[in-house]
Image (tube, rainbow, N blue to C red):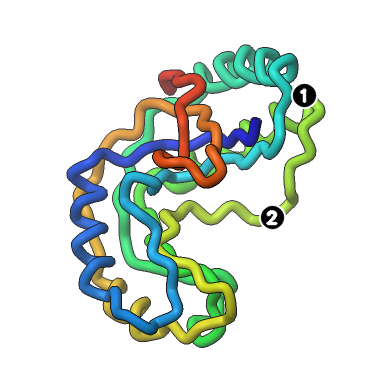
Amino acid sequence: MRLFLAIDPPDDLLERVAEAAHALRSDGDGLRWSQPADWHLTLVFLGEISDERRSLLEQRFAAELRHHQPLSLAVRGAGTFPGDDTRARVLWAGFEGDIGALGRLAADLRRVARKSGVPIEHRPYVPHLTLARSRVPADVSRHRWVLRSLATPFWTADSVRLLQTIPGGSPRYRTVATWPLG
């Protein structure tokens, strides 16, 4: 099964982000807008994991998460992948708050996964909610400009979920396990 670790922002916060994103949607912009029910703050993408390895990973992740305290986070502004707004494939909402601790959490979970034999990509960690994707590079500079003032209240992220991706399914993700932080 395809698995990843994520933090879920609260529903009321996602509603605020959805309102801001909805105002940007237009027919013919070439963007595929994601649904708020699918939004999460990914920590580590694990890929295909066997049931045997999943059981081991669950134990190791639970032990690691005890060493990390809850985080104060808020959604702030927007960005793109790659970083050129005029040739973007992904438009995302960013985060503010305990970003250093969030980065350490993601790095420590990646380390646990690697030590457990899971190949993890080496790329900088950029905390975000994916709002829209494009199959071809698109100019989303207007979208990013509008979202620059996106700001939600802070909330306390106090748990991490292990999620399974369900190809073509609805919902797109299923919770496999949940652990508290701290």
In the image shown, does 146 or 38 lie closer to the viewer?
38
Q: Secondary structure at mark 2?
A: loop
- Tell whether 94 sits left or right of 101: left
Q: How many marks?
A: 2
Identify the element where label 1 is drawn: loop
Please tell me whether residue 129 is drawn above or below residue 67 in the rendered image: below
Determine whether 85 is above or below 92 in the image: below
Q: Residue at x 46, y 37 (%)?
A: 173
Q: Is residue 182 visible?
A: no
Q: Which residue is denoted by mark 1 in the rendering?
A: 116
Q: Amino acid at mark 1?
A: Ser
Q: Position of residue 31 (x, y in %)?
A: 43, 74
What residue is shown with label 2? 123
Q: Is residue 91 visible?
A: yes
Looking at the rendered structure, the kind of residue marked 2 is Arg
Asked if 113 appears above or below 126 in the picture, the reply is above
User: Tag 1: Cα neighbours inside 10 Å, few (<14), some, or many (≥20)?
Assistant: some
Q: CA distance from mark 2 to mark 1?
A: 19 Å
Indicate the position of residue 68 as horizontal and vertical percent values.
49, 26
Marks 2 and 1, the one that precedes in the sequence: 1
Q: Depth check: give the residue in front, 121 or 68.
A: 121
Residue at point 62% right, 32% down? Answer: 109
- Give the quadrant of the N terminus: top right
Residue drawn at x 51%, y 31% is 163
